Amino acid sequence: MHNNTKHIPKRRWGIGALLGIGVLINYIDRIGLSVAAPQIQEAFNLSPVDMGILFSAFAWSYSLLQIPVGMVLDRFGPTTVGRWGAFLWGLASTITALSSGFAGIFAARILLGIAEAPAFPVSSKATGYWFPRKERGTATAIFDAAAKFSNVIGVPLVALTIVHSGWRYGFALSAVLSFAYFIAFYVFYRDPSADKKLSKEELRYIQQGGAAPEGPSDAGALNMLGYLLTKTKIWGLTIGFAAYGYTFYLFLTWLPGYLVQTMNMSILKSAGFAAIPWMVATVTDLFVGGWLIDHLIAKGKDESAVRKGVLVTGMLFGLAVFGATQTRDPAWAIFWISIALGGLAAAAPVGWSLPSLIAPKGGAGTIGGIMNFANNLMGAAAPIVTGVIVGATNSFANAFLVAGVLLIIGIVSFVFVLGKIEPIPDPEPASALPATAQ
């Protein structure tokens, strides 16, 4: 069996790379404001609270649409939803580049949140379709690591563009990249059963290896949502991932500003320093959250124990954020933040692999939507809470403390509420419920 695997065609990995490129561009769209923040703040005389609101605008619309988008995704599938989503990223980024003043940027960020809402659920569901369970760790880590790697190449790239040409050109760059991805996704992505270039041998390998079944649930979208919300496993995943989301978004939005304000760096220098923790995060995401998990499972280790062990250990490393509260030395600050982000990054692909691993048929998109709704609701709160704390204290120390406390709550949820990582039974089909309309 192991030897036969070497001769199986690898088209699925091309699809995995395509999804990773999409998330990479998706996040470059998002981080543009973080890099441009000092320039925009000065240009429009905005307070830290104003900036916190702008940072969070994307997350409000993005998070509020997660559950509806998950239901639409389970109904129409990754191909259709992914195409529309990618097109709208480009449109929203174009509008962002043309906006001016607080109100215009705020509205553009709200629109970007709407446009990018399907991105991660589409990648998660498509990965469930395209990969057997034993490869799901690495496949998920590819697109999740792309979110971290966007800060390694995206922050310096956008920073160079903004410093030399102005902040509008930074957003114009992301618009061009977004439309290029839309074309690539339209041309190359199909679900496995509809992909004419996928060999029968590889399709059989994917399906026999426990790939998620294609097609909508027989239960109907609303029935599926109600059913999932009664499951303790869903709440354990959701609370734990929300705690991760708060700290992740704190660093995603405020890390360059923290280095400029606390460490007195220039925008370009802060972009270079900020890339270090994200590089560490990219490596741990791919090799611990991805390769190591698949390797241990292939060696015969218990699948649930391996995934949960990496999930909880990664969150524990995230508590290194407390170390950043105790220093004003840039090197030590980056050291502690690198440990924290590296741990969280190892946990993240486990979190994103869970929807397709625990979902009943046709429920992965909805689970991803529920989990990402809470994740991004906390992501919307993190920049505002941080802005208020920094505005009141002129320090990031207490903002990092809040993140650490929330991580502890998330760890408790993953350990005691999530339970064993195994599929949830299918709900009753909609046909069994008399008054259900399609």
Image (cartoon, helix red, strand yellow):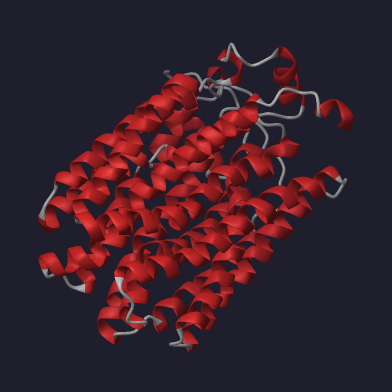
Image coordinates of residue 237 in percent, x first then y, are 58, 53
In the displayed structure image, the side of residue 152 where residue 40 appears, left or right? left
Q: Residue at x 30, y 47 (%)?
A: 61
Image coordinates of residue 207 in percent, x first then y, are 72, 23
In the displayed structure image, the side of residue 119 where residue 364 appears, left or right? right
Name above or below for residue 405 compared with residue 106.
below
Task: Pick the quarter of the image with the C terminus.
Answer: top left
Q: Nearer the viewer, residue 242 or 55?
A: 55
Kindly indicate the quadrant of the structure image that contains residue 202.
Answer: top right
Image coordinates of residue 10 in percent, x first then y, are 68, 26
Image coordinates of residue 242 in percent, x first then y, are 49, 58
Q: Residue at x 50, y 81 (%)?
A: 331
Kindly indicate the quadrant of the structure image that contains residue 336.
Answer: bottom right
In the displayed structure image, the side of residue 386 where residue 145 appears, left or right? right
In the displayed structure image, the side of residue 191 where residue 152 appears, left or right? left
Q: Residue at x 25, y 64 (%)?
A: 37
Whether residue 72 is visible here, answered yes or no, is yes
Name above or below for residue 38 compared with residue 311.
below
Kindly indicate the quadrant of the structure image that contains residue 114.
Answer: top left
